[in-house]
Image: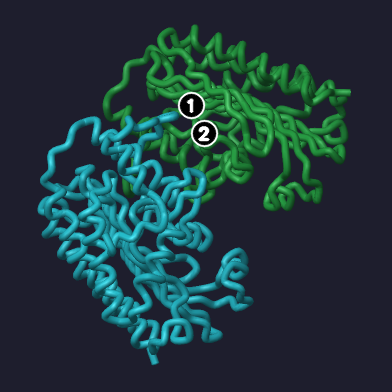
Chain colours: A cyan, B green
Amino acid sequence: MLDKHSIAAQYQQIQNTICQSLQLLDGAAVFEEENWQRTGGGGGCSRVMQSGNLIEKGGVNFSAVHGYLPDAIKKSFNTDNDDFFATGISIVLHPHNPWVPIIHMNIRYFEMDNGLKWFGGGIDVTPHYVIPKDASTFHQHLQAVCNAHQKTFYTKFKAWADDYFYIKHRNETRGIGGIFYDRLTPENTDLSWAGIFEFSKAIGNSFIPIYKNLVAQTRNLAFTPQQKQWQYQRRSRYAEFNLVYDSGTKFGLETDGRIESILMSMPPMAAWVYNYKPLPNSNEANTMDLLRKGIDWVGN
Amino acid sequence: MLDKHSIAAQYQQIQNTICQSLQLLDGAAVFEEENWQRTGGGGGCSRVMQSGNLIEKGGVNFSAVHGYLPDAIKKSFNTDNDDFFATGISIVLHPHNPWVPIIHMNIRYFEMDNGLKWFGGGIDVTPHYVIPKDASTFHQHLQAVCNAHQKTFYTKFKAWADDYFYIKHRNETRGIGGIFYDRLTPENTDLSWAGIFEFSKAIGNSFIPIYKNLVAQTRNLAFTPQQKQWQYQRRSRYAEFNLVYDSGTKFGLETDGRIESILMSMPPMAAWVYNYKPLPNSNEANTMDLLRKGIDWVGN
């Protein structure tokens, strides 16, 4: 049997490894660390870097919280049970260079004291400019990580990410997706609890190699002030998604989590320009054409 | 009896008057106008100016929409009726100069074909730097407009604005408030329908004198790049309020309104800085101390 404290401890170890690698990769900024306690129970360790070489603003948060579940969440989880435990890592990195994509990773474990429990998580990427070759490599990498655990996962979780990271009011996806999964149990995965946990850790451990690959070329590309402005505009869509739709943000707001940790995902600077229309056939227009569901990036 | 088409026509006339005055006041930018149709019924006229002398981004929207009400809205309005009509003006102005406050005004009329109907609206101000003297003058002006129609309004609607424009997850008000009212009927106002409509128009017509007064001195004040940065940071809270809490934004998103019109309220540029703490006794810290409910600005 898995023990929730052991899961939390192993997640925290993954946070440490990721933060060490990210500082090396950035080469300038260091993480500012906040250890916080939640009034209702538990707490976390938030690490955020700002104004780095590579990363304009990025957070790698760990938390392990417990206590009473608010009514709104109980309703959405379809349970009457009050006592919950939730642990996870959440990462969002906003780069300086508009050619480098925004990346998001989350692994999490949730349980109630009546035995209900599950794993959730995923990795997804939001390019300001979609580079199809990089998008394919990214998805192939995710497919390989998934296949090492369960052959059905990539196809299923890629479609789930397309549906989840969708900005309905804009009729556009947040980015090129990735994988998203939730409420994984032995019943719906054909894996043991230990097997699902191994998969969860593999996603966590794949973060650094995946991100290194995404930034290797792009971080050195030159960009114009107009391209930086486009990055600000794309970031505003990221902000809209997180504030209007994101379940993790809602869960954090409704369970009175530490607000600066919950909203560390927000972009350092974002622009809302009224009625902006990219020029036909521009890099910006081509990117918009690729922000839709159902693109088979692996098969490209 | 009031006629909904006559209400809409008179609101549109107020939009015209306000836009003419705002162009004169700005002195540089002109409004870009979009006339749009809503698939489900009705439409609107959106007017937005960007990069003016005074106004960095501002919108003055009129709409008159009708059709079937989505289930989520029916539930929140506690009605089974399907057919609705809604008309109103909505204004948000984001100034260049951080000493000039953001202003918001809305007047609206809603009715269902079963006879349920009401007026709503208000004016509120979000300074990047609270100037107590200006806040008092603003509230005194609102009180005078209210008193000309119904002596009980100002106190009631001022408290309503304090409660409505509250960013729960930040434990701060969006700004210094103003007045907010909703679902006004003869039963809860001791005014006739015509009297409530007159009050609604008086709020609309008070917008220009109130705004002129707020900008007269402040638009000429010098500001530093650090103060501009603070403005970006305060705007991010405005974005959070509108995307997480604002009923008008939710109504627009759920009734498939024109997205660029609904989100014209979003700031032209906004910053999220992690864990920012203003220096003690700074202008920024003093402003934060005044972003709370229950301040008696009129009595100051």
- Image location of residue B232, percent across then percent down: 36, 33
- Element class at badge 2: loop
Q: Are marks 2 and 1 on the same chain?
A: yes
Give the residue at mark 1: B102
Looking at the image, which residue is at 49% across and 16% down? B31
Left of B210 or right of it: where is B82? right
- Given residues B166 and B291, the one toward you in this image is B166
Tag in front: 2 or 1: 1
Q: Is residue B280 visible?
A: no
Q: In which image quadrant can residue B95 be found?
A: top left
Report x, y in % for residue B156: 72, 34
In the rendered image of this protein, does residue B105 appear above or below residue A219? above
Q: Residue A213 is drawn in which quadrant?
A: bottom left
Residue B175 image label: 2
Q: Are marks 2 and 1 in contact (CB under 8 Å)?
A: yes
Q: Horizontal placement of B300 versus B169: left or right?
A: right
Please name the residue shown 35% across and 37% down the image. Answer: A233
A51 relative to A295 in the view: left or right: left
Residue A241 vs B225, above or below: the answer is: below
Pointer 2 local density, CA inside 10 Å: few below 14, some 14–19, many at least 20: many
- Tell me: B102 left or right of B4: left
